[in-house]
Amino acid sequence: MRVASFPARRGRTIGGIALSLTLLGACAVALAVTVAALIGGAPTALAQGPHVDVVSFDQEVDTASARFLTGAIQTAHDDGSALFIIEMDTPGGDLDSMKAISQAILASPVPVAVYVTPAGGRAASAGALIAYSAPIIAMAPGTRIGAASPVDSAGDNLPSTLDAKVKNDLLAMVRSVQKAYHRTVAPAEQTVTSAASFTDQEALDNGLINLRATSRDDLLSQLDNTSVVMFNGKTILLQVAELPVTVLEPTFADQVMGFFLDPTVLFLVFIVAAVCIYLELAHPGAIVPGTIGAIALVLFLLGAGTLNPNWAGLALMLLAIVLLAIDVRVPTHGVLSVGALVSLALGSFIFFDTGVDRNAQPLSPVIIAGVVIGVGLIALIVLQFVIRSQRWPVRTGSAGLVGQQATVLTPLAPDGRVRVMGEDWGASLAQSDAPPIEAGASVRVVRVEGLKVLVESASDEVGVSRRHK
C-alpha cells in the first residue's frame, strides 16, 4: 500500500534536524557513561611497603579537586604511606570545597605536608586555608602564601554583615589549627582579616609555616627523624629520608569530573538537554533527542549543586523549555519562543552567579548571549516547519484521497471499482446522471463516503480547465 504524505515528509524533516542537532549531545552522553562507570574511584598507589605519597595540586579549589585530594588522602592511609605531601600552587577557590579538603587533612591518620612549590607558586585564598590545616607547611624559595579574605564571585567585597560572618568563621578555624600545630596565630589571621600575603622567608620568620625547602628531597631530608604533632594531639616520628616516593595521579574519572563541573561546560550540557527535549516535544516519537535530553538534564542537575547556584535561575531556565514546547502547539506565532529566550538568558545569569568566594569568573555573558541566539535560530527553524505543515493539505487517511487520480477497474455505470493510491476501492459517479465511464479511464476522487469514493471524469476536469483558459 502506498501512502504519499506531506506531513510524513514533515516528520522525517524535523526528525532529521533532531538527529543532526542531537549529535551535539553525544559528548554529554559519553561523559555520562564515563562518570557513571568511574565515579567513586580514587588514586591507586603502586608502592609496596613504607613509602611517601605525593600529589601535585596546581588547580583551583573546587568540587573536582576536592574529590581528588580527599580520595588521595584516603589512598595514602589505605596503602600505608608514612607521609602524604601536597605540592601546592593554587589561586584558591570556593569555601565548601576548601572545608571538605581541610576536614580530610585534619582527620587523616597519615601526616600531611603542604609544600608550596615551584618558585613563583602560591597558596592563595582557599589554598592558604588548606595549608593551615596541615601539620606541616613548607615553602620553596620565591613562593608566597596568604590573601585569604573572602570575596564574592566577581572579586568584590562582601556586604558588611555577611563579610563579618564569613571572616569570623574562618578566623576561628585558623586559630584552632595554628594553635594545635604550635604555629603563630597572628600572621595567619592577617591573611584573612586584611588579605595579607607573605613570602616564604617572611612566613618562616613570622612562624606562619614550619620550614623552607629548596626541593622535595630537601623537604624529606629536613623532616627525617623529626616529630610531627597531629591535630588530635598525637605525636608521630617521621623517618622518610630513604623511603621511595609514589606520585598519585588523577584518575580518568577525576579528569572527566573536573571538565564536567566547569560552569561553561555545565551550561552547555543544560543547553543540550533543553534543545533535545524541545525537539522531542516538537516531534513526539523521535526518541533519540528525548533520550539524550533526559541524560543531559540529569547530568546537569548532578553538577548544578556544586556551584552554590541560585535555584530561581534554574526555574527560569526550565520555564524556557516549557515555553518553547508550548509554542509549537498553539498559534502564538513565536511570541512564546521570544519569552522563552528571555527567560533562558535571565535564568542563566542568575543561576550561574555562584556566590561567595569563588576565584573563577562567573559564566561569560558572551557565551550566554551566543547560546541564546543559537537556541533562537533552532526555535525559528522548527517553527517554520510547524507553520508550513499546518498550511499543507491533508494527505493521509481517507481525507487524503480527495483530489487524487484513480484508474477505473470496472465500468462505472454509475457504480464500479477504481484503483487509487495503490488500493482497490468501491466507487460511484459523483453525478448520477453522468455518462458511464469505461475501465482503464482516469477519474478524480471528489469525496469519500464510508468505504466508497465518489469520482468524476478526470478528462472532464482537464477540458473544463482548457475552456477557462
Image (tube, rainbow, N blue to C red):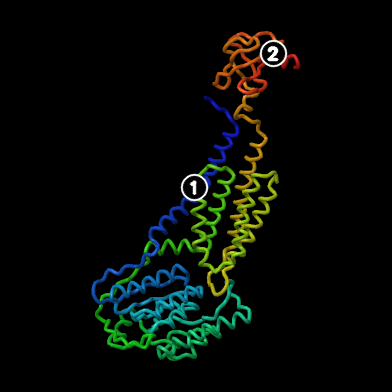
Please name the residue shown 54% across and 49% down the image. 276
Q: Look at mark 1 in the image and give the residue it sits on.
A: 23
Q: Position of residue 380 (x, y in %)?
A: 64, 46
Badge 2, how many Cα within 10 Å: few under 14, some, many 20+?
few
Q: Amino acid at mark 2?
A: Asp
Indicate the quadrant where residue 13 lies.
Answer: top right
Could you say which is closer to the camera, residue 432 or residue 216?
432
Q: Give the structural element (helix, strand or loop) at label 2.
A: helix
Q: Position of residue 100 (x, y in %)?
A: 45, 75
Q: Amino acid at mark 1?
A: Leu
Q: Give the structural element (helix, strand or loop) at label 1.
A: helix
Query: What mark, if any, has residue 350 been given in the picture?
Result: none
Mark whose residue sits in front, 1 or 2: 2
**Quadrant in the picture for the C terminus:** top right
Query: What mark, if any, has residue 460 been given in the picture?
Result: 2
Q: Is residue 28 left or right of residue 468?
A: left
Badge 1, how many Cα within 10 Å: few under 14, some, many 20+?
some
Q: Position of residue 335 (x, y in %)?
A: 70, 49
